[in-house]
Image (cartoon, rainbow, N blue to C red):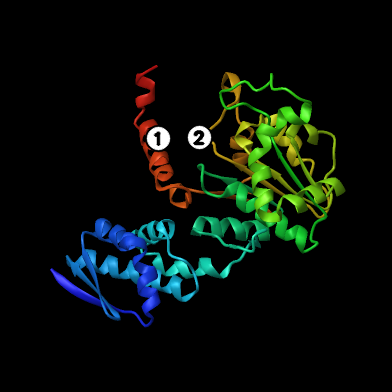
């Protein structure tokens, strides 16, 4: 057993580090099997030498975030723990320097993981980006944020968001209303992200002016999309023919972002996914980037990360085949 001291300059940082009911510190104690106590301006960490070293590195990384004006919460504590395991905790500071967009409520939106940071950099530096990974990694939300930032900077004149109208195991064709009412359920995640960035009133005004268009993928056929930031969401549910159609809509001064999760393909009759094929076909073309997220980039509830890992293990072991 050893003891190591971490000095904290500001008392409010100690309070923020520990969190409500010491929840942040309790996470670190459970993870590393150490005891962490506050003594004035010092934090004392006691335990086995390797575990104490990791806990101290995690604490110092969290203090660096506090020094940069960030708030400590369960998500970034968990992420710092994962970075310490990879000896990459020094990279955490790079996340707080990138403000992607200011939301309608005045909140600066920043990448929360290194995977999200790579995604943002790819969106800035490439004309077409494929963002592929599990649910909860911010693929769609960050793409919409980048689209709004480009629109506000007058880099593009239109934001176009689209997704294939494929049901996730449910039949929605008998919903009441006109065609727009029927397709709205498919497009709801895109609306939600736009409302967050622009506010409902601004969103409606830009829609009426034609600056924002949210439509099913079928509406894209035959068009040339100039001066636009185009997002294709849920792209795992496109066919190869639909994906090719979408990619060839790209016009002058436009960007395209394609997002999807290849573990959640809802195409009928085991049809090939256009996203899976596009990842293979486009991987070596300049000005096209393929960014793959992992479960470490999940920024939703901690259980989402655990669920994804459990399913990955289940399918890797082939257990699903034994029940067929």
Q: Secondary structure at mark 2?
A: loop
In this view, the residue farthest toward the bottom is: 9
The dot on residue 263 is 2
Quarter of the figure with residue 56: bottom left
Give me the residue at 70% from left, 33% from top.
Answer: 184
The dot on residue 102 is none
The dot on residue 311 is 1
In this view, the residue farthest toward the top is: 324
Quarter of the figure with residue 169: top right
Does residue 13 appear to the left or right of 41 in the view shown?
A: right
Residue 105, given in percent of the width and then of the height, sits at 64, 60
* Dot 1 and dot 2 residues touching (CB under 8 Å): yes
Does residue 174 appear to the left or right of 4 in the view shown?
A: right
Residue 167, given in percent of the width and then of the height, sits at 61, 26
Q: Looking at the image, which is closer to me, 313 or 74?
A: 74
Q: Secondary structure at mark 1?
A: helix
Quarter of the figure with residue 82: bottom left
Give me the residue at 13% from left, 68% from top.
Answer: 1
Query: Alpha carbon of mark 1 to alpha carbon of mark 2: how far?
Result: 10 Å
Give me the residue at 44% from left, 47% from top.
Answer: 301
Upstream in the sequence, badge 1 or badge 2? 2
Q: Against 290, is 41 above or below?
A: below
Residue 268, given in percent of the width and then of the height, sits at 60, 21
| Residue 10 visible to the viewer | yes
Classed neighbour count for the residue bearing mark 2: other residues with Cα under 10 Å, few (<14), some (14–19), many (≥20):
some
Quadrant of the snapshot with the C terminus? top left
């Amino acid at each position: 057993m050893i003891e190591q001291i971490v000095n904290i300059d500001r008392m409010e940082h100690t309070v923020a580090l520990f969190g409500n009911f010491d929840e942040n510190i309790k996470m670190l104690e459970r993870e590393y099997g150490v005891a962490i106590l506050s003594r004035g301006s010092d934090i004392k960490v006691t335990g086995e030498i390797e575990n104490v070293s990791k806990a101290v590195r995690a604490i110092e990384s969290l203090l660096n975030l506090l020094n940069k004006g960030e708030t400590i919460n369960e998500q970034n504590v968990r992420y710092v723990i994962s970075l310490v395991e990879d000896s990459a905790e020094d990279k955490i500071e790079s996340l707080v320097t990138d403000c992607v967009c200011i939301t309608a409520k005045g909140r600066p939106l920043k990448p929360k993981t290194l995977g999200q940071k790579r995604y943002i950099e790819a969106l800035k530096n490439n004309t077409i980006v494929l963002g592929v990974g599990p649910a909860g990694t911010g693929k769609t939300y960050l793409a919409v944020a980048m689209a709004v930032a480009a629109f506000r900077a007058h880099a593009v004149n239109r934001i176009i968001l689209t997704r294939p109208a494929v049901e996730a195991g449910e039949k929605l064709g008998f919903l009441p209303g006109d065609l727009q009412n029927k397709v709205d359920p498919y497009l709801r995640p895109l609306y939600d992200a736009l409302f967050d960035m622009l506010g409902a009133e601004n969103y409606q005004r830009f829609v009426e002016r034609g600056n924002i268009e949210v439509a099913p993928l079928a509406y894209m056929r035959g068009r040339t999309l100039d001066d636009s930031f185009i997002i294709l969401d849920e792209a795992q549910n496109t066919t190869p023919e639909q994906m090719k159609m979408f990619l060839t809509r790209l016009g002058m001064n436009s960007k395209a972002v394609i997002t999807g999760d290849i573990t959640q393909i809802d195409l009928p009759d085991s049809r090939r996914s256009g996203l899976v094929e596009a990842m293979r076909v486009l991987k070596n073309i300049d000005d096209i980037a393929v960014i793959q997220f992992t479960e470490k980039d999940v920024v939703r509830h901690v259980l989402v990360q655990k669920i994804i890992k459990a399913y990955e293990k289940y399918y890797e072991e082939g257990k699903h085949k034994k029940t067929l």
